[in-house]
Image (spheres, rainbow, N blue to C red):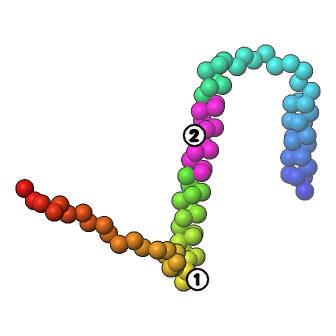
Amino acid sequence: MKKTQILMTLHLALWVMVGLTLQAAAYIDPSVVSGLLVSVAGAVVACSAVFFILWRKLKKKVTRTLGIDENANKEVEEELVIKDDEEK
């Protein structure tokens, strides 16, 4: 119980220090902003790639488990082979 009380006091003290800060003397360079945007965009692309890979695996497993055939109602066209009438 004592550890919990100490941790709660430290947590409250940290939030009070952060909350009572009036002014921060910091300069954010434009290169930092562009680097941040690039890293966020890269993270979004990576997460979406992982999502779609997992989605395909899950979809494949579910269709195999339920016995659903994706090509059941699709029309298949015959191959069209064109031959020259006159061979030179």
- The numbered dot on residue 66 is 1
Q: Nearer the viewer, residue 82 or 44?
A: 82
- Magenta region includes residue 47: yes
Q: Residue 12 location in percent, x, y?
A: 91, 40
Q: Crowding near pointer 2: few (<14 within 10 Å), some, many (20+)? A: few
Left or right: 11 as drawn, with respect to 40: right
In the picture as drawn, the residue positioned furthest to the left comes out as: 88
Q: Nearer the viewer, mark 2 or mark 1?
A: 1
Residue at 86% across / 30% down in the picture? 18
Taking 67 as reference, is 9 left or right? right
Magenta-tinted stretch: 36-48
Q: In this rendered view, identify the residue nearer to me: 13 or 65.
A: 65
Corner quadrant of residue 38? top right
Q: Residue at x 58, y 76 (%)?
A: 62
Tell me which amino acid carries mark 2: Gly
Residue 29 magenta? no
Q: Which mark is residue 42?
A: 2
Q: Amino acid at mark 1?
A: Leu
Distance from Cα at disc 2 to Cα at disc 1: 36 Å
Mark 1: secondary structure: helix
Look at the image and tell me whether residue 64 can be seen. Answer: no
